[in-house]
Amino acid sequence: MSLSSIFDEGILKAELQRHGIKPLHVYTIWRHVMDHPNAALHQVPGLPGALYPLLRTRFKALTSTLAAHSTSANGSTTKLLLQLQSGQSVETVIMRHHGGAGKYAGGPRPGSDRATLCVSSQVGCKMGCSFCATGTMGFVANLTAGEIVEQYVHASRMSPIRNIVFMGMGEPLNNYNSVVQAVQTLTGRCFGLSPSRITISTVGIVPRILSLAGDLPGVNLALSLHAPTQALRCQIVPASRAFTLDKLMAAVDAYQASSNRTLFIEYVMLQDVNDSSQDARQLGCLLRDRKVVLNLIPYNHTFVVGDYRATPADRVHHFQKIVREEFGIRTTVRQEMGQDIDGACGQLALKKLKASPDMEDIFLDLQRREESRR
């Protein structure tokens, strides 16, 4: 039987309750594991005697191991390869916004505390976005809440983490319960991260968008849009055949009415695909009068089949100028980091698992789930 992660809060608290042990001991265990990376659970001091055999037989301090890590030439980005106890692997990326990466015994450490951690929520992804390397893997497995939190634990031993973005491998809202539990743990008593420093990205799982404001108040939402029309979006984001643009924007409006939060729009710039002046104006019309920040993302080359190229910088800025000046939409261009270690947007993939997903199965699955909720 596989042991559970000690950072899987729901499972740990349920076991403690079942054995009549107070849940406050959870935080004692977590703090000790965080402060003593090599300590075994039976070495945690001050616990009730009945708790030690429970920890030994049901839990592990970490169910994942750091198999490898690589740091970009400029020290700004470190990609971690974590092996799960299932034998599968995931990648997570530390992005340092200022300062270099000095060295210490455990690996690279930044010269600043403004590091962002890009975490994965699944092994692989079933959304099949045509420009994304992770999409070529197909869906392999959901991560548990503990496995998500463990990415933070591993990363924080290399850099102090200030922000977390769910923009790694997988569609977070397709692993909704684990993502919600992981965020609640990370923003809870022990870790104490602010919800406003956590961002969850989605291609647009409409029912879950409608639930998010109530389940995770204060957390940011980012929408991977990538096209201003339904027809073009279907080419770039095939899963949008199940969640059409009109339904998606209606869900966005409902989310914002409930949360009163700014929505972040992600838009990968693909040369001669979605980067024309007409595309910019169509996008401006779509987003106008909504409380959004548009983030234009330079395309990063991957091994995916397709003839995509990055939009030239001058054309990106022309696109930005149209949306910003003609439609009054706050628009930024993302500073890309980690391209030299395949750690930038759209590049995360475990090449040994690479396999094209069956897109028709994906569409049918999403459509069935959408229809079952009506």
Image: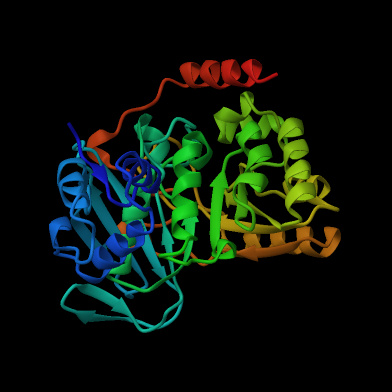
The quarter in which the C terminus is drawn is top right
Locate residue 103: give its quadrant: bottom left
Q: Can residue 166 be seen from the camera position used here?
A: no
Q: Can residue 115 be seen from the camera position used here?
A: yes
The quarter in which the N terminus is drawn is top left
- Image colouring: rainbow
Residue 292 falls left or right of residue 61: right
Residue 268 placement (x, y as % from top left): 57, 50
Locate residue 191: give its quadrant: bottom left
Question: How many numbered discs, if any?
Answer: 0
Residue 51 falls left or right of residue 265: left
Q: Is residue 237 above or below residue 66?
A: above
In depth, the one of 367 and 231 nearer the eye is: 367
- Identity of the residue drawn at 38% across and 53% down: 23
Residue 233 falls left or right of residue 255: left
- Identity of the residue drawn at 48% across and 60% down: 188
Q: Is residue 146 above or below residue 304?
A: below
Residue 22 placement (x, y as % from top left): 36, 53
In depth, the one of 152 and 231 nearer the eye is: 152
- Identity of the residue drawn at 71% across and 35% down: 248
Locate residue 323: give its quadrant: bottom right
Residue 243 placement (x, y as % from top left): 65, 28
In depth, the one of 4 and 64 nearer the eye is: 4
Residue 306 falls left or right of residue 223: left
Residue 142 placement (x, y as % from top left): 37, 35
